[in-house]
Amino acid sequence: MSTRPAETLDHGATPWLFAAALATTLPHAAHQPVWLSVLATGVFAWAGWLWWRNERLPGRWPLALLVALASGGVLFEFRTLFGRDAGVAMLVVFMALKLLELRSRRDATVVITLGYFLLLTHYFYSQSIPTGLWLLAAMTLLTATLIRLHGGPASSTAATLRYAGLLTLQAIPFMLVLYLLFPRVAG
């Protein structure tokens, strides 16, 4: 399947996507099975190597096989594909494998969206201040990646991060209002 030139992913946006994917999946390593962390690390390394060497990404069938094997592993580990732990494991699998099919801006947008979902799932395991600070930084990185993706190669790293930081600061009052008005569910 060919991608229209206007939708083709800029080669320089890929490191941003890798950094955002790593920032959102890395903290889950403590809560996931070892084999899943090894799989995600291997897929991240493979995708990074393919990007670095400017090699062709794997086709549809190798990816389908990887999805089937990883889903089978999650099913074997958790006895279900649903629920908190199995669902988070599937999101980690999706994030890792999506890096092997980054061909268009649409694919990159899926990575960013998965990143935002993975950020929310961190709160299943920890609601501490360090977790909140990590997730705030990761959210800023995800937002910067989205800006870089749609801002084009002309936007500098400093300008992109500055704008993402400004957007994050502007969101804090809204976050505080939501925190005060909406009840937190215990347990």
Image (cartoon, rainbow, N blue to C red):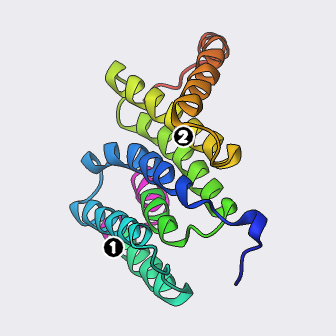
Coordinates of residue 127 in the picture (x, y in percent):
38, 26
Give residue 24's quadrant in the image.
Answer: top left
Quadrant the N terminus occupies: bottom right
Question: Magenta segment, which residues?
Answer: 77-90
Mark 2 in CB contact with mark 1 (< 8 angstroms): no
Between 140 and 5, the one lying in front of the other is 5
Q: Is residue 28 left or right of residue 68?
A: left
Mark 2: which secondary structure? Answer: helix
The residue at 25%/64% (across/down) is 38
What mark, if any, has residue 164 been given in the picture? none
Q: Which residue is mark 1?
A: 76
- Point out the residue furthest to the left here: 34
Q: Is residue 121 left or right of residue 108?
A: left
Between 180 and 116, the one lying in front of the other is 116
| Residue 31 part of the magenta-drawn span | no
| Amino acid found under the numbered disc labelled 2 | Leu
Query: In this picture, is 139 found above or below 18?
Result: above
Give residue 133's quadrant in the image.
Answer: top left
| Residue 83 part of the magenta-drawn span | yes
* Secondary structure mainly formed by the magenta segment: helix
Q: Which residue is mark 2?
A: 142
